[in-house]
Every structure is written in C-alpha cells, then in structure tokens.
C-alpha cells in the first residue's frame, strides 16, 4: 500500500484520480494543477510517489525544478512523445520513471508498483471496515461499537475502533470510558507501531478504541495524510479495524473511505435519509469507482412503521440491502446511557443478534484467506499484557 499525489493537467486529472481511488491499496493524498502547489503540498504530505505531468513543467521556475530534483519522494513523469526534450526534463528533476501520456492506462499502474515507496511495515493484513452515512443519527456509532464487540467475541482476538467522527466522537462513551490518549497524540511524525498502540484505550477485554480529539481546536490538528500510516500500523496489529466516520466528504473521510476494504453505508427507512444516501451511493459508484463488494448497504431501524419496506429501500437505492438491523425501542439509548454496549447489556435482543449475524458474515468472507501471522502481533500481545 502506498500514498500518491497527483499533479496533472486537467484533461487527465479525473481519469487518473478515478483509477487511483478505485484501488484500496493506493491512497490519494491530493491533486494540483501546477508544479508549485504540488511541491508545497508534498513537502507536508510526504507521498509515496508524485505523479507529475510534463505539461506542468513548461512554466515551472528554476527553483521549482530544483525542489523536485531534491524531493525525498519518487516522481513519475507523465509525458507526451517529444523525445530528447522530455528526457532532459526527466533527468533535471530526477524522475524515477517516464510514462507515455497516451499509454498511461497500461503503463501507470505497473510504474507505480515499481517506483512508489510502500508505507513502513506494509503487509496489509487486517481489514478496514468503515461505517458511513450521509446523515447523522442513523446508528453509525451504535453499529461500529457493537460490531467491534461481536467480531472480537467471535474471532477471540482484539479489534480496534477508530473514532473518526472527530468533532462529535462518542465511541468511548458508549463503553463508559474516558480515554487519556486520543488520535491527536499521533499527529507528530514519525509514527511507530509502539506509538500507535500507546494511543489506544482498552474499553473491554479485546476491544480497543482510538478516541476522537477532546476539543474542537484539536480536531483542526488532524491531517488526512497522517492517518494513512496510523491505519497501516493498525492493520498490522488487528484482524479488524472498524471506523466510525462522520457524515460528509472532507479529506479525512475520503482518504479513509479510499483505504477501506469495506464501507458499510447505513440508511434508515425514511425519505430524507434515503435521498441523502442515494447521493452518496452515486458518488461512490461514479466518482470514486467503488464496486458493490466494497460498498454495502445496511438498513437500520428496519421494521419501523414508516411505510417504507426493505424492498422499497433497495429499489430506491438501486442496490440490494445486504444487512438489516431491526429497530429496538429505547434499548440502544439505554445501553448508551449506562456506558455498556448493547451486545453486553442485552445479548439476546433482536438487534444484538442481527449485529452478530453481520459480524459472522464478514468473518466468513475471510475464512481460508488469512495466513497465520507473526511479527508485530507477538509484540502487540506482550504490549497489551503489560498494559492491562
Ligand atoms: N436499531 C435501533 N433501534 C433503536 N434505536 C437505535 C437503533 N440504532 C440506533 N439507535 C439510537 O439512535 C440514536 C442515534 O444513533 P447513533 O449510533 O448515535 O447514530 P450516528 O452515529 O449515526 O449519529 C442513538 O440514541 C441510538 O441509540
Ligand atoms: Mg455517531
């Protein structure tokens, strides 16, 4: 897995961005239409590779060319076929590879594989499962928390929840926990596995939370590109990384959605939510090029007497409802008030059983695919023993 920054002229931008977004192992850090902006952004973002359009070098200053030549990240130059002039520019900026603009669909991905610097410790083992909705109050946090508990119960292995509803994060509260550390503590490079593990709060045996920042001021400090290595380390240490996202499409959400293996999109059976969710699904399909394996529809509060059935939901959203979660009166709210997850408070309730079923289905997809792991996990186990 690696991060990519794209600086290309507008005729190619959309297509290249789509190509990158469609691949969970590539994470787009940003785009620019001129070399100056790209250089400035990359100084902050430390991409694994910069895809740079030769067309943008025509007006670049000598300073800009020198910055590129000294850049610590590899550069792939995308160029038309005008021979020696291109070769000279590629040499000047120290490009690692040259890709023909006309052939980029065939050449770019192989070039990325060759040139890009993978993230530290990259083995890409654990699965990142994001819980998203275009609306608040639909049950994202309720599902994230209880899905994590259920997965941990079933795989007998630790699971982590990342609270990326940065401003209103309340995952820890659902477990009655008051974290001493938050994701804010991880915003200073360089990141190590040890630093990431040290920022987690164990809220139940086998269930860890990377908590949201404590204040709105701290939320400002969270940078999307800094989250990428955090996820990378979490993937190393956990089979399942559950992410509770906020509504909307800010850079933090988009980066996280891109690197997720599965996005659970929650809707409820009401017209306002369906309309908003329908727009998200369209964006995911057409703008982000995510497929139906990745984007999965969850109907929460199914069976509410709204006059809208599960068939109506699937027809409106043009996508099957894969998972249905029943409405459960005030039980989830009572669990939240007590700081005890529903799965522990009322494990026999129909909502708890439905979440358990969702967890089982996610686990089944994995069976046979996952090798036994060594390395960071052994370290992780001794770490958690020491900190219990
Ligand atoms: N299936 C359900 N049945 C009853 N109440 C639910 C259900 N799902 C969620 N809730 C309640 O709805 C409210 C909003 O849920 P929450 O998970 O906080 O939404 P979000 O994170 O999407 O904003 C909470 O009080 C929660 O307990
Ligand atoms: Mg929430």
Image (cartoon, grey):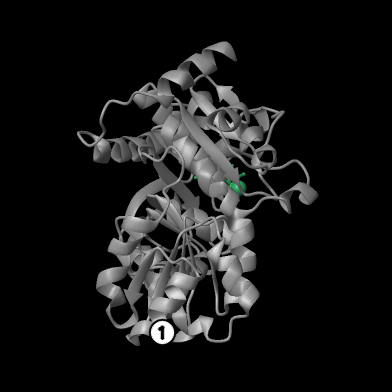
The answer as to whether callout 1 falls within 8 Å of ligand 2 is no
- Image quarter of the C terminus: top right
Callout 1: SS: helix
Q: How many marks?
A: 1
Looking at the image, which is closer to me, 330 or 96? 96
Looking at the image, which is closer to me, 190 or 332? 190
Place of residue 261 in the rendered image (x, y in percent of width and height, measured from the top left): 37, 49
Q: Residue at horizontal 43%, vertical 73%?
A: 90
Q: Residue at horizontal 36%, vertical 39%?
A: 123
Place of residue 94 in the rendered image (x, y in percent of width and height, measured from the top left): 47, 66
Place of residue 41 in the rendered image (x, y in percent of width and height, measured from the top left): 62, 65
Place of residue 204 in the rendered image (x, y in percent of width and height, measured from the top left): 55, 22
**For residue 299, which quarter of the picture?**
bottom left
**For residue 51, which quarter of the picture?**
bottom left
Residue 68 shows in the view: yes
Residue 303 shows in the view: no
Q: Residue at horizontal 51%, vertical 19%?
A: 205
Query: Crowdedness of circle 1 by 10 Å Cα count: few (<14), some, many (20+)?
Result: few
Residue that protrudes farthest toward the left in the picture: 368
Asked if residue 347 lies left or right of residue 82, the reply is right
Looking at the image, which is closer to me, 142 or 232? 232
| Above or below, comparing residue 17 to residue 245 in the picture | below
Residue pointed to by mark 1: 85
Q: Residue at horizontal 55%, vertical 67%?
A: 68
């Amino acid at each position: 897995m690696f991060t990519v920054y794209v600086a290309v002229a507008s005729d190619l931008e959309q297509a290249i961005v789509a190509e990158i977004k469609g691949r969970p192992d590539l994470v787009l850090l940003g785009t620019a239409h001129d070399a100056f902006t790209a250089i400035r952004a990359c100084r902050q973002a430390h991409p694994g590779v910069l895809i740079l359009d030769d067309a943008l070098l025509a007006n670049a200053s000598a300073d800009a060319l020198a910055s590129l030549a000294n850049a610590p990240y590899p550069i792939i130059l995308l160029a038309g076929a005008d021979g020696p002039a291109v070769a000279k520019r590629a040499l000047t900026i120290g490009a690692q590879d040259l890709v023909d603009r006309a052939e980029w669909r065939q050449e770019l991905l192989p070039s990325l594989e060759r040139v890009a610097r993978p993230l530290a410790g990259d083995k890409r083992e654990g699965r990142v499962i994001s819980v998203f909705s275009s609306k608040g109050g639909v049950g994202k946090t309720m599902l994230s928390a209880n899905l994590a508990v259920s997965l941990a119960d079933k795989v007998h292995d630790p699971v982590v929840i990342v609270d990326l509803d940065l401003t209103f994060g309340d995952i820890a509260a659902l477990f009655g926990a008051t974290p001493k550390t938050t994701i804010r503590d991880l915003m200073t490079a360089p990141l190590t596995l040890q630093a990431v593990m040290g920022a987690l709060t164990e809220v139940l045996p086998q269930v860890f939370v990377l908590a949201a920042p404590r204040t709105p001021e701290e939320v400002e400090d969270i940078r999307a590109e800094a989250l990428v290595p955090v996820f990378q380390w979490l993937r190393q240490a956990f089979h399942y990384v559950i992410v509770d996202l906020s509504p909307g499409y800010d850079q933090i959400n988009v980066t996280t959605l891109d690197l997720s293996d599965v996005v659970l999109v929650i809707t409820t059976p009401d017209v306002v939510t369906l309309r908003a969710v329908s727009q998200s699904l369209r964006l995911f399909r057409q703008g982000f090029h995510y497929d139906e394996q990745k984007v999965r529809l969850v109907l929460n509060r199914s069976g509410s007497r709204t006059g809208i059935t599960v068939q109506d939901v699937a027809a409106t959203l043009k996508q099957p409802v894969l998972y249905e979660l029943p409405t459960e009166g005030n039980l989830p709210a009572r669990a939240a008030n007590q700081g005890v997850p529903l799965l522990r408070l009322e494990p026999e309730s129909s909502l708890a059983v439905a979440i358990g079923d969702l967890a089982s289905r996610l686990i089944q997809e994995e069976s046979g695919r996952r090798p036994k792991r060594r390395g960071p996990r052994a370290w992780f186990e001794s770490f958690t023993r020491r900190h219990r």
